[in-house]
Amino acid sequence: MSKLNKKTIKHSIIAGGIFATGIALLDFLGQTAFNFWKYIFNFVFMGISLGVFVIKPSLKNHMNKSKQEDSSSS
């Protein structure tokens, strides 16, 4: 597995967890019962969505810039 894919998966899991926890917190503050399946859905769906559409392109650009800087400094 490439370095980009590992970073994308790691950041997707973190982002999905943060989003799902935030939604669960809003439900808790709104006096709504905690729904485990809604939490899992938010975690997985948003983690994948953020990973594919936001995190991977930005990591790809960052890694390309790093490679260009390394090759220009040599």
Image: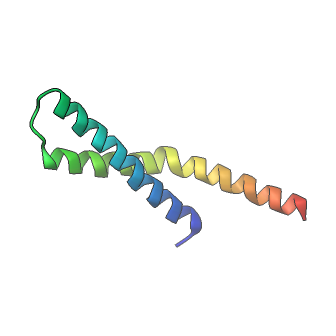
Q: Position of residue 27 (x, y in %)?
A: 18, 33
Decide: is 59 above or below 23.
Answer: below
Could you say which is closer to the camera, residue 28 or residue 46?
28
Q: In this view, does 32 lie to the left or right of 25?
A: left
Residue occupying the far bottom of the picture: 1
Residue found 56% across the figure and 70% down from its top: 2
Total numbered labels:
0
| Residue at the limit of the structure toward the left, as seen here | 33
Residue 66, image x, y percentages? 74, 56
- Residue at 33% x, 49% y is 17
| Left or right: residue 50 compared with residue 74 | left
The quadrant of the image that shows the C terminus is bottom right
Q: Does 58 sit above or below residue 9?
A: above
The residue drawn where x is 19% and y is 29% is: 29
* Residue at screen point 14% across, 49% down: 36
Residue 69, percent across and down?
81, 56
Colour scheme of this structure image?
rainbow
Name the spot of residue 41 as percent of width and height, x first.
Answer: 23, 48
Left or right placement of residue 27 versus residue 46 in this view: left
Residue 64, relative to residue 6: is it above or below? above
